[in-house]
Image: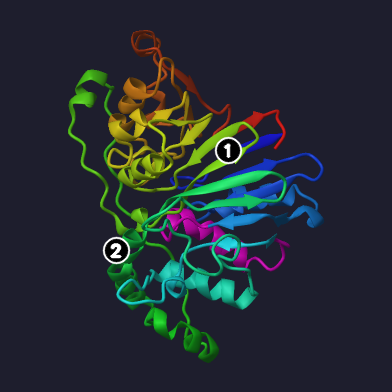
């Protein structure tokens, strides 16, 4: 048994994985935007008996608040038992050799403080307490987990982690701390918690003209935080899923090439950065042999998924790609159009209720 739940995480990601039957094992990836923990993740956790709230792995893909805030809220909730055998999260301590030190923003420092305070196993499984990172040369890291699951790291690379330095240092100025001072500041009680700033709201979508959208030029996302995102290929038995976080598409394509594949054969792909026009390139989609593409966003803040990204999936995503949306919104409903489906041969899938997200299940053994 394998179950993938793309929880309703507002404009962020919160992905819940279950695999196996006796016992059922679990992985949690990100916690969504502010408020998602209380509204979505906490009720999902409370459905489990206390003794089953021990996860094989907790992954915090990167420091953006739409991924990390729900995990911070989870870590602060002392009333809800939760354990993870290991946490994958890249912080300051994981790349010690200058000039490649990796610093982080205020949210990264807050999670660092919580991990240290709670004594969590941190980047241990597969990475020996070092950075969760793709090496410059050689094979991609392939990490085995109990129960027959394997993760192959696709992002980030060392240079992309290094790019995060200035952004993280600048963000830390807001809380009057440097990452180097974190350990001392914790002991002296100087660590502060700040709420996330909310980006501006982008204009709403227009009715899609697929051919015009395909003519739009592609400019890759240059966000340092997104470039530092942990992304991996998940394999369980014959099942293969790409969980792309907010990784840069060129990084993913390069990792596919390093795997020795012209195309990466997949059963499903959680597209990078919620279907952003700068993160879903035609080149990436052309390197995937997949017919199920997951878009995770309610459209708040940045109006994801962008129509250019959806058009690229429709054009290059196989003979009959399925677009799986975890919300029905203005940005996603425009693709629920029989004329467009007939013309381009794609399929759409929406949740019955925007409060439930998307659940994908496969009956197989690891």
> From what the image shows, is residue 27 above or below residue 287?
below
Q: Is residue 323 above or below residue 167?
A: above
Q: In this orientation, does residue 194 appear? A: no
User: Are there few (<14), some (14-19), or many (20+) residues within 10 Å of tag 2?
Assistant: many
Q: Secondary structure at mark 1?
A: loop
Q: Quadrant of residue 158?
A: bottom left
Instruction: Tally the numbered discs.
Output: 2
Q: Is residue 81 left or right of residue 283?
A: right
Residue bearing mark 1: 355
Q: Quadrant of the C terminus?
A: top right
Quarter that holds the N terminus = top right
In magenta stretch: residue 201: no
Q: Label 2: which residue?
A: 163
Image spot of residue 189 (x, y percent): 52, 87
**Residue found 51% across the figure and 69% down from its top:** 111
**Could you give the CA–CA distance between mark 1 and mark 2, rounded to whole angstroms?**
36 Å
């Amino acid at each position: 048994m394998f179950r993938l739940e793309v929880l309703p995480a507002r404009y962020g990601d919160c992905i819940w994985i279950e695999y196996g039957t006796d016992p059922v094992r679990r992985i949690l990836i990100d916690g969504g935007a502010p408020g998602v923990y209380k509204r979505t993740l906490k009720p999902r956790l409370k459905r489990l008996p206390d003794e089953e709230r021990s996860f094989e792995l907790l992954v915090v893909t990167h420091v953006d608040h739409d991924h990390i805030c729900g995990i911070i809220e989870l870590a602060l909730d002392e009333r809800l038992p939760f354990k993870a055998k290991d946490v994958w999260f890249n912080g300051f301590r994981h790349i010690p050799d200058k000039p490649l030190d990796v610093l982080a923003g205020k949210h990264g420092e807050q999670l660092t403080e919580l991990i240290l305070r709670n004594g969590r196993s941190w980047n241990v499984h597969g990475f020996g307490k070092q950075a969760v990172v793709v090496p410059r040369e050689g094979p991609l890291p392939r990490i085995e987990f109990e129960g027959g699951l394997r993760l192959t790291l696709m992002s980030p690379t060392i240079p992309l982690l290094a790019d995060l330095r200035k952004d993280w240092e600048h963000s830390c100025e807001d809380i009057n701390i440097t990452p180097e001072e974190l350990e001392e500041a914790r002991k002296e009680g100087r660590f502060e918690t700040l709420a996330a700033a909310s980006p501006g709201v982008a204009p709403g979508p227009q009715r899609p003209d697929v051919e015009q959208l395909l003519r739009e030029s592609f400019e890759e996302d240059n966000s340092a935080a997104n470039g530092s995102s942990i992304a991996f290929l998940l394999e369980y038995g014959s099942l293969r899923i790409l969980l792309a976080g907010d990784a840069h598409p060129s990084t993913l394509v390069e990792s596919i090439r390093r795997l020795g594949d012209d195309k990466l054969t997949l059963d499903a792909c959680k597209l990078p950065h919620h279907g952003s026009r700068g993160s879903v390139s035609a080149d990436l989609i052309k390197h995937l042999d997949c017919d199920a593409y997951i878009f995770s966003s309610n459209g708040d803040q940045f109006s994801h998924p962008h129509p250019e990204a959806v058009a690229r999936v429709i054009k290059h995503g196989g003979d009959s790609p399925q677009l799986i949306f975890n919300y029905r919104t203005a940005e996603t409903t425009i693709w629920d159009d029989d004329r467009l489906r007939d013309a381009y041969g794609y399929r759409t899938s929406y949740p019955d209720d925007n409060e439930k997200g998307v659940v994908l299940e496969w009956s197989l053994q690891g």
